[in-house]
Amino acid sequence: MNIWNELRERLDKHKTIHKKLATDDYERVKGLEIIVKCLTKHNLTFRGSNEKLYQDSNCNFWRLIEMLVEFDVIMQDHVNCIQNHEIHSHYLGYKV
C-alpha cells in the first residue's frame, strides 16, 4: 500500500520516470539537431568512407558525435549503450 501512496505523490508532483526519460530523449535529439545544423550550414557531407565511431576516416557526422560525447553525459550514456550492444535501433544510425 505504501508503494501506491508514493506513486500518487509522484504523480501529483509530476516526478515520474517517464518525465526523466522524455527529458533525456529531448537532450539527445537536441545535440543531434545542433550537429545537423552545423554540417548543413557549412555545406559539409554527413557520410564518409567509414560509418563507425572512433575509427580513422569516419565521416564528419561521427567526428562531431565523438566531440559531443566528450562533454555531454546523456549522449555519452547513449553511445555507451550502442557500443555495448544494449541498443540496436538508435538515433545515430543511418537507417533511422
Image (tube, rainbow, N blue to C red):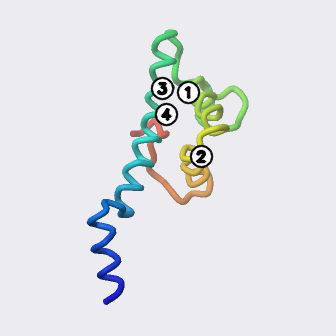
Q: Amino acid at mark 4?
A: Gly
For label 4, count other residues whose C-alpha is less than 10 Å away and answer few (under 14), some (14-19) or many (20+).
Answer: some
Q: Of the two numbered discs 1 and 4 on the same chain, state the one appearing first in sequence.
A: 4
Q: Nearer the viewer, residue 81 or 6?
A: 6
Q: Is residue 22 above or below residue 52?
A: below
Disc on the earlier residue, 3 or 1: 3
Q: Quadrant of the C terminus?
A: top left
Disc 3 and disc 4: Cα gap in Å?
Answer: 5 Å
Read off the residue under disc 2.
73
- Work out whether mark 1 precedes mark 2 in sequence or the reverse, and give the earlier one: 1
CA gap, disc 1 and disc 2: 18 Å
Q: Is residue 16 left or right of residue 59?
A: left
Q: Residue furthest right?
A: 56
Left or right side of 87 for 71: right
Q: Amino acid at mark 3?
A: Ile
The residue tagged 3 is 34
Residue 55 position within the rendered picture, expressed as x and y whole percent measured from the top left: 71, 35
Residue bearing the label numbered 4: 31
Figure label count: 4
Residue wearing tag 1:
61
**As displayed, is residue 60 above or below residue 31?**
above
Q: Residue at x 55, y 43 (%)?
A: 75
The quarter of the picture where the N terminus appears is bottom left
State yes or no: discs 3 and 1 in contact (Cβ < 8 Å): no
Contact between labelled residues 4 and 3, with CB atoms less than 8 Å apart: yes
Q: Which amino acid, mark 2?
A: Val
Local secondary structure at mark 2 = helix
- Residue depicted at x 26% and y 65%: 12
